[in-house]
Structure formats: C-alpha cells, structure tokens
Amino acid sequence: MSWMASLRLTVAEDVLSVAGFLLLLWAGWAGDRAAKAIGWAAMLALVGAAVVTLPALMNGAMGPGASAFYGQYADDAFAAFAKLLIYASAIGCLLIAPAFFAKLGQHRAEYPVLLLLAVLGMGLMVSATNLITLYIGLELNSLAAYVMAAMLRGNERSAEAGLKYFVLGALASGILLFGMSLTYGFAGTTSFAGIHAAFHGPMQLGATFGMVFVLVGLGFKMSAVPMHMWTPDVYEGAPTPVTTFFSTAPKVAAMALTMRVLLGPFGAQVHSWQPIIITAALASIVVGALGAIGQRNIKRLLAYSSINNVGFILIGLAAATPAGAAAMLVYLAIYVAMSLGAFVAVLMLKDVDGNQLEDIGDLAGLSGQRKVLSACLAMLMFSLAGIPPLFGFWGKFVVFQAAVAAGLVPLAAIGIAASVIGAFYYLKIVKLMYFDEPAGRALGKSGWEHQAVLAICAAFVSPIGYLLTKWLGGLAAVAASALFHT
C-alpha cells in the first residue's frame, strides 16, 4: 500500500495532529485569554475527525483494505466505533470545562490542546495492529493525561493526583514494555498478525509471562483490580472536568485496546488469558461495589463505580466471542453516557457563591430545591445500578447474555449476584436526595453547557434509549466482527 493510501486511512489522526499543532501555536501566541476560543476550535476538530471516521463504521471496513503503514494501523469498523465514543466524550468534556476553570481563575489555553493530544493518542491505541504503534499511542495519551491531572497548579490535591498518576503510570508503562519485549522475543515480530501466527500452538512459559505483563499494563489503564489503586485518589484530586474525561474516553480506549490485543495476537490462547480476565472481572465488581459503600466524597464514589463497571464489561471479554465483543461495545456506549452525565451532575453541585461541593451529605434533600437536577441524577444512579427500565440495565443484560451463550453460566450468575451490592450505594444517593432533610447548600446555578450535556445523557439512559437498541446493537456487531475477521 502506498503512503498516500495510508495517509487517507489515517485522516482522522491527521486532522487531530494538524489541529493540535495549530492550536498549540495559537495558545503560545495569544495566551490564556484565547482559552475559550481554542476550546471551541478543538471541539470543531473533534467533530471533523468524527465525520471522516464514520464511513469506516457504516461501511463495515475490515481486513487488508483497512490496514495502513504496512500493517501497523487499522482503520476498521472496530476502531471507528471506539473513536466515535472517544470523540463524543472529549467534546462533552471540553464543553463543560470553561465554567469550572473560569470560576477558579485558571482557564488555561493549553487544556484543550492537551485533551486533543490525548485523544490523538487514544486513536492510535484503538487502531494499533503493532506493538510499537500501541506503545506510541498509549504514551502520547498518558503524557498529556499526567499534565491534565495536575492542571490546577496551586491546588495541593491536583498536584498530588498528577504525581500519583505519573509515578504509577510510569510503573505500569514499564511493566507493559517489559511484557512487549518478552512477547517480541518469543514471537520474533511486533506485528499482531505475526504474533498470532507464532502463538497459534502451545505457548512457552516466557511468552505466557509476556502476555501477563502486557495485561497488567493494560489493566492499569482500565482501572481493573488489582491495578486500580490509583483511581480513587486521582479522580478525587484532579479537576472535575479532567476526572470526567478520565472516566470516559481513556476507559473506552483502554478497553478497546485490550480487546484488540487479546482477541488478535493472543486470540489463539483464550485458555491462557480467560481465567485472568474472569478473576479481574469478578474482583473489580466486588472491590468496586464494597469500596464505594463507605465513601463520603462523591468523586471517590464514582471512581469505585467506574471500577465496578469495568468488571461488568470484562465479563463480555471473558466470553471471547463476537457476541461478547459486541456486548462490550454496547455497554461502553451506555457507560460513557452514564459516567459523563454523573460527573456533569457533580459539576452542577455548587453553593450560592459558585463553589464546588463534593461531599455526599450536600445532596440531602436536593429534590426540594433543584428538582430537574435531582431527577436526572436519580435516573443516572438507577441506570448505573442496572435497574430496569433504565438503559443501563440493557448494557448488563447483553454482557450476561453473551457470557451465558459462551457457557460461562457461573460467571454470569456471580456477576448478577454481585451487582446487587453495587445497587446499595447508588440507591443511597437517591434516598439522600428525596427522603433526607434538606442540607440547603447545593443552590448554585449552572450554565447552559452543563444543562445541555446532562439533559442529553439523562435522555440517553432513560427508557427512550431502548429505541436505539437495534441500531446500537447492529453497529456494535459490525464493529466486533472486524476483530474476528481473518
């Protein structure tokens, strides 16, 4: 394939690269006074990237025709599905950020540029078909994320979050790189197709260790137990718009990359990695549910909720079937809306002076003063708990259905039983809002951006979302089939 043909397949990344470079120059020239305009320009770039990405999904692109740069990059339907979720998450996070940073007097021009570069890295991650491309994309995303976590320069919690994320992220990156080195040593290639061919038979012990180390590195990015320890501290300390971003787009990228790695190069070794995924899934569900029960900070609670949801998504991966992969993509789409909406609701919890409120006790009696916000947040909590008729129930249903179809009935049964634990803390928030005496603190008003994003997310997770099941399931099935195309 010619270089021009490859560049045509990577046009979404080309758009984001050029936009990131131009916006960086703009930020350096105009400074923070242009931060809002740069944010809107970044959103425009993301919309452009989404427009050029959509045809690959709608046309079901897969196979050699979707491969670029000599098998290092894939512009297939699977990557397109993941990228569209990433772009949608990033646009939402850019939209809600200015009001938060402006209140603190720290609306930096570099924030939208860093977010754009992080999204560029995620695009490379989900399209990677070579270990080198995988690592470049992951590091591009990580380096931007470390700075974003510490964006509030004078805030101790933000600095602590950035430092913790950097140290633990560097450790995970080293583990991943070591696993990639072992994999390369035993396979003799960094190409996913070549690794799959090399590991088609029984794996040597060293190659198995390589696969496990790769899984550990990816597990850190997913916040899967036992690589989850950074999540509550970073989510609590980072600025809330950054936390919103961390809980959505990078989760999609890490999960999609893990799917591509395990179902691609290690696709013939399901019996080797399936027990690891099952263990991580169950541990994430239980730890996420139990860890959230005693939390007083709502951002920490949502961090454990994120860990809990990762466990449910991994059940689909444990199935190792096209149906399981499609179920994961459906769940991810619903999870992005639930998580984005929940954090936007947190951003809207402000006192009359516009100061951010994060204590769960501040939600007491909220329904008496802010009926619409309370209704939307209650809907999101019920959806995260997987309670019908909210759309979050459908995400859990398709994942459990795929597990049962793959013969993993005990896993599905344990997952269903464990989901009851998680429902406790979601229902506790609803109980606080509707049945406790009013705290009378969260009385501050929010801008139209927050209201619009919350309304869209709440509508998506409401029973109205079921109108999209056939359409969303069809797109997910097309995307998942690209992973199993030989």
Image (spheres, rainbow, N blue to C red):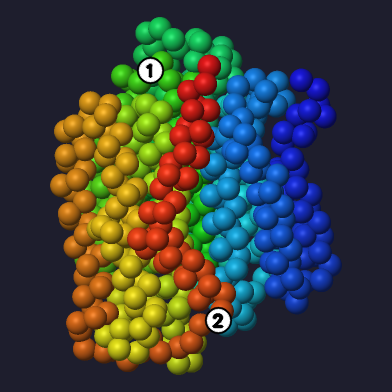
Question: Residue, x 21% and y 70% (percent of image)?
Answer: 428
The first of marks 2 and 1 along the sequence is 1
Tag on residue 249? none
Which corner quadrant of the image does residue 368 belong to?
bottom left
Quarter holding the N terminus is: top right
- Judged from the image, the secondary structure of the residue bearing numbered disc 1 is helix
Asked if 393 appears above or below 366 in the picture, the reply is: above
Residue nearest the viewer, comparing 348 with 380? 380
Question: Residue, x 60% and y 68% (percent of image)?
Answer: 95
Asked if 188 appears above or below 389 in the picture, the reply is: above
Question: Residue, x 60% and y 60% (percent of image)?
Answer: 91
Residue 398 image position (x, y, % from top left): 32, 41
Residue nearest the viewer, comparing 429 with 157? 429
> Dot 1 surroundings within 10 Å: few (below 14), some, or many (20 or more)?
many
Asked if 405 appears above or below 189 in the picture, the reply is: below
Tally of numbered discs:
2
From where the camera sits, is residue 68 visible? yes
Q: CA distance from mark 2 to mark 1?
A: 51 Å
Question: Residue, x 67% and y 70% (percent of image)?
Answer: 108
Residue 475 image position (x, y, % from top left): 50, 40
From where the camera sits, is residue 385 visible? no
**Which residue is labeled 2 in the image?**
447
Residue 12 image position (x, y, % from top left): 70, 43
- Judged from the image, the secondary structure of the residue bearing numbered disc 2 is loop
**Which residue is labeled 1 in the image?**
269
Residue 268 image position (x, y, % from top left): 41, 16
